[in-house]
Amino acid sequence: MKFDLLQKDPQSKARAGSITTDHGVIETPIFMPVGTVASVKGVHQRELKDDINPDIILGNTYHLYLRPQTEILEKAGGLHKFMNWDRNILTDSGGYQVYSLSSNRKIKEEGVKFKSHIDGSYHFFTPENVMEIQRTIGADIIMAFDECTPYPCDYRYAQRSMHMTHRWLDRCINHLEKVPYKYGYEQTFFPIVQGSTYKDLRRQSAEYIANSGQQGNAIGGLSVGEPAEEMYAMTEVVCEILPEDKPRYLMGVGTPINILENIALGIDMFDCVMPTRNARNGMLFTANGTINIKNKKWEADFSPIDEMGHTFVDTEYTKAYLRHLFAANEYLGKQIATIHNLGFYMWLVREARKHILAGDFRPWKEMMVKNMSQRL
Ligand code: PRF
């Protein structure tokens, strides 16, 4: 993997760059659509490529390990082939999903024992076996096995958990050296900063992660219920320490406003279920604010879904029609809303990149944040 830092914004910490892997170029800042179980819910790979056009999508080790299971992915020749996606993929390690989805989990130094949310069976994740699973899934970027602390989290727990995440990181790195790539292309490993909402812990964790000398770095444990201002404060202290010449990935963030504010603090990569999950509930993101398409006020509004939108659904369908599809609980409604939201998120990060390159990111961001705060 290669990272080229192309431009720094003079009035903020925003950067534009490009990451090159064996599956192509990723222009940063980037938003990665979430394809948890080898599918971006409701979107054909053809639409994803032609209409939404992301350079990279995200998959989840936790889900793929439970279903279809690692053995099937190995027989398929890896996740790219299995799902017919020849661009980049990043897999999360399960370090978050284990805590948010499984029940009866027990965290020990050795690893995490958890109960499957699918059939109630018991499983054990360790830094070592999660690295092996990620080798077999075969994503281009793979993540460290960490513990994502909840919010709020008392200082002593956050401190102990952070140190365990650091020890787990060493185990991940040691083990990866022993397990070669499986499918002929390179995999890049990203460690994850933790430390809850404590600046001193965040600084300590960022130093540890930076010193591990990997080719990219991630920030976890944020967007777990803390106020946005606390998230930004943590991103700021961590970005001061993480090396400038490597990409920075803020995990699980966020709203369109969160994304612009964190780009301004020096983040290059984002993922979040919000555009896809909220779409399935009828919430649309636009440059002028959010729309609840289920609202009666759209019943006879025959204007396009989003006049300024950038995907085919925005101009081919009306608000009244989309509202009707939600009222009738038609699959097509969720599909249209998903394509709209993903198209909007991709437009937003590409536009941010253009403004960083042009040198006017800061005023553009301020205007966008104001406009996007509205409810339509
Ligand atoms: N760790 C991992 N994945 C994550 C997170 C984390 O802390 C978050 C936190 N918002 C999202 N996804 N491994």
Image (cartoon, rainbow, N blue to C red):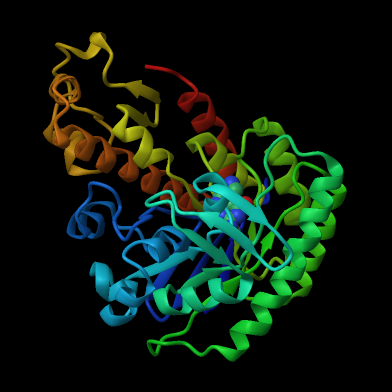
Residue 312 found in image quarter: top left
Instruction: Decide if residue 159 is on the left or right side of residue 73.
Output: right
User: In percent of the image, x 51 and y 90: which residue is there?
Assistant: 180
User: In percent of the image, x 70 and y 47: which residue is there?
Assistant: 235
User: In percent of the image, x 74 and y 45: which residue is there?
Assistant: 196
Q: Give the percent coordinates (x, y) of residue 41.
A: 28, 48
Instruction: Decide if residue 235 is on the left or right side of residue 49.
Output: right
Q: Give the percent coordinates (x, y) of residue 39.
A: 29, 56
Vertical relation: 30 (above or below) 331: below
Vertical relation: 245 (above or below) 206: below
Name the one closer to the observer, 351 or 48.
48
Res. 168 visible in picture: yes
Q: Give the percent coordinates (x, y) of residue 128.
A: 60, 76
Instruction: Decide if residue 309 is on the left or right side of residue 370.
Output: left
Name the one closer to the observer, 365 or 300.
300
In the rendered image, the quadrant that contains the C terminus is: top left
Q: Give the percent coordinates (x, y) of residue 75.
A: 28, 81
In the rendered picture of this protein, how many numbered marks are placed on residues? 0
User: In percent of the image, x 65 and y 67: which residue is there?
Assistant: 191
Instruction: Decide if residue 276 is on the left or right side of residue 179.
Output: left
Vertical relation: 307 (above or below) 138: above
Residue 240 found in image quarter: bottom right
- Work out which residue is located at the far front of the displayed protein and give it: 121
Res. 251 visible in picture: no
